[in-house]
Image (cartoon, rainbow, N blue to C red):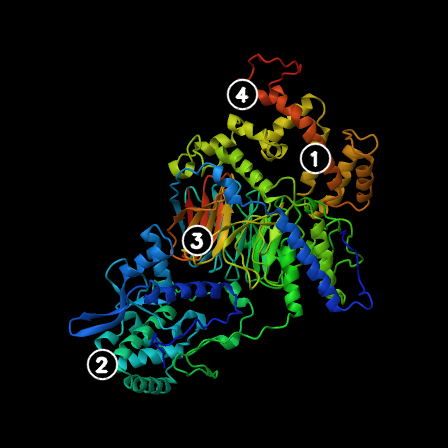
Amino acid sequence: MAEGSKDQACVGAIDPEDDSPNMIIYRKIEDVVMRIQDEKAGGVTIRTVKSFLSKIPSVVSGADIVQWLMKNLTIEDSAEAIHLGSLIAAHGYLFPISDHVLTLKDDGTLYRFQSPYFWPSNCWEPENTDYAIYLCKRTMQNKARLELADYEAENLARLQRAFARKWEFIFMQAEAQVKIDRKKDKAERKILDSQERAFWDVHRPVPGCVNTTEMDIRKCRRERNPHRVKKSVYGVSDENQSQPSPAHIPSQPTRKPTKEDVQKEVTFSLRWSTDLSSLRRPLLPPPSSITPDTSEIPSDEPSPYLAFPLHSIYPLSPLPLPLLQITFLNIQLDRHCLKVSKVADSLMGYTEQFQEYDPFVSLTEPSNPWISDDSSFWDLEASKDPSQQRVKRWGFSMEEALKDPVGRDQFLKFLESEFSSENLRFWLAVQELKRRPLQEVASRAQEIWQEFLAEGAPSSINLDSHSYERTSQNLKDPGRYSFEDAQEHIFKLMKSDSYARFLRSNIYQDLLLARKKGKSLTGKRLTGLMQSS
Amino acid sequence: AAAQSRPSALQSGESLATLKNESDSLKKKLEEERAKLHDVELNQVAEKVELVSALSIRTRRVLKGHGNKVLCMDWCKDKRRLVSSSQDGKVIVWDGYTLNKEHAVTMPCTWVMACAYAPSGCAVACGGLDNKCSVYPLSLDKNENLAAKKKSVAMHTNYLSGCSFTNSDMQLLTSSGDGTCALWDVESGQLLQSFHGHTADVLSLNLAPSETGNTFVSGGCDKKANVWDMLPCASVSCRLYDLRADREVAVYQKDSIIFGASSVDFSLSGRLLFAGYNDYTINVWDVLKGNRISVLFGHENRVSCVKVSPDGTSFASASWDTSLRIWA
């Protein structure tokens, strides 16, 4: 039956090759739990406690565990240590000897450590027949400490109904277990019984307690090694569970790398491939079905949808994966990357610039509605009157100005006052084109061409000949991204020209310095047009 | 080395082994090149930055109403409404500020793992074990049955793990357990673009918050902190990966944090990182200095989703304890 003695040098039974997220967690917990129990290496003192007429073997107080956690895992706050300890208990690695509810208390409550045999890392999924045998055997033994709790009695009743037909079998199994248990040493039995109970407290928790064995369904759906799942403590499952308590698993022989491994590597590399700038301009037209065009891999520019062409070619031709990897790696090598010091400066600069806008870092004016229950902050944001702070943000970059609808309007207003709004209007039109439903895209694209780019266009914009040619070609088969080139060009133009002028304009400065409308300006600017509406 | 264009057929005489060697040496070269860029640690440079003033973040709202684990949530652009979806098949639209439940939809499947609010505020998208992503227009008429106007947009061959509207109500980006991401035209239901490249489930996706680009990141890689372990050997800690340097620039971990993080989001300025964990807590990290500023207790089971509101005034967390909390 259960191997309860901690004399057994059971190292964690986790397959060293198993790196699933759950196993990573279990490994970490098991590392902690083994360290706690290692008295020679600074662990807690596990001892026998005398109580009334009996002795309680192999226990430690909750307070001792909390202390150890705080000291060895560098936890400043005992609340955190208690929380972590409770989770370790809830997952079944330690348990209070007199309670079904698995939490850690920072006092004299006594706890025991779970046997490695029952560790969750053994992939336990005990079935109800097992649970029935367990509850049944509990009722056969005349010991106060084995009396069923109310919820257990209810569970037993329910199981008796469910397994009415095979109850005889269950009863016999329970009797057999009782016989086996009786042969064990008394002190050892106390420990084993408690560990067995703790095991069931994890897999059949007290109503109201979190069931830590609940899995995220996405992880359930993934391929799992069915051989490793253990379904029965008492060996009554249909599957032939030939393993007894796990001994140290010998290290697996190193597998030869397979195609899957290379595939994984390609995926891994692909994950780190995104080049922000190139992603803006897809070079491949959107496919009408999933079967892709396999005519070529773009050779001179990193494809924005790198994931798309590479994988799409793979299933259709016998192209070996290393070839794809080589192509990909060469693209990566060509990328211009920044030093970490530069990146760090950039990150620091950004956070500093936006610090005053971050309600978690700076106080908001007026108060944060969530805290004060006063929604003035939102009312202000919604009004057409932007605060100085908000206007200041438009000055950070043209992107910021355009992001704010009021900023965008003011920018447009300024340009209109200068009769040079066609660039911005073009840019906005293209943005809007991308938001349209598919069936409107082609006609809208044509409209934009007519308005801004065609010969004699009413709002003619200035494009370099290269972009113009390219756009003209794109318009032969108009799509959502037909104007990407042109849009980028215009964006750069506005940034260096119109935007700078906007920031110097009265329209902007008035708002920034909160000069009242209608008042005459004391500024030196002589732009001439000073309409306030 | 310029990118070689070697489409279609395998060159005769080249064995798999030769190619593998070439790819290995290129990989090594890439590692060396990248290592040269690693001239300093982010937290070292950040030493001169002022400490973030002591935060007193507390739960400001608790949204109760789901009958089972809350798996996903998303904010409305109006900064106070949100949509949440649950294992029990229900999708609820709340006014987080008043705690009012404004709409509720019962999906035909359980485990609704993804939900998203349309930019206009007039619709929500959701899906999960039904392998689809459907869009529900939100009616002002309380009596109207939302399910009647439901529109099936995305179709995958495995569960839907994430969805997000891109520019407008008209385009939907989805990620799926079938290993792909896809962009759909909402009105026609047509597939606009398909993204292959993962050999395992895509568990999440995140859009770049930029007006000027159409960037998105899928699955295990986030241009910011990554907590999705898609590949068997991925870790469960939070990492900051910078695309410009093409490397990891920070790891957010602590000895006492054993359980993995399920979801993260940045505060408005990017200075703070809020991460929801499987140990029921939310940890607040200083992105630059790398230390943990505070730990927030409150949820009674795993935190499945964390999102900062559009104006950064609060963040919401969804949990397996069936509730949502709004923190500020």
Label 3, secondary structure: give it: loop
Q: Residues within 10 Å of mark 3 (few under 14, many from 20)?
A: few
Asked whether, in this view, residue A51 is left or right of residue A249, the answer is left
Label 2, secondary structure: give it: loop
> Which percent across, then down, holds residue A312?
72, 60
Labels 1 and 4 share a subunit: yes
Badge 2: chain ID: A
Badge 3: chain ID: B
Labels 4 and 2 share a subunit: yes
> Which percent across, then down, holds residue B249?
55, 48
First of labels 1, 4 by sequence position: 1
> Which percent across, then down, holds residue A472?
82, 40
Q: Residues within 10 Å of mark 1 (few under 14, many from 20)?
A: many
Numbered-mark total: 4
Q: Which residue was labeled with disc 4?
A: A513
Badge 1: chain ID: A
Q: Nearer the viewer, residue B25 or A478?
A: B25
* Amino acid type indicated by mark 4: Leu
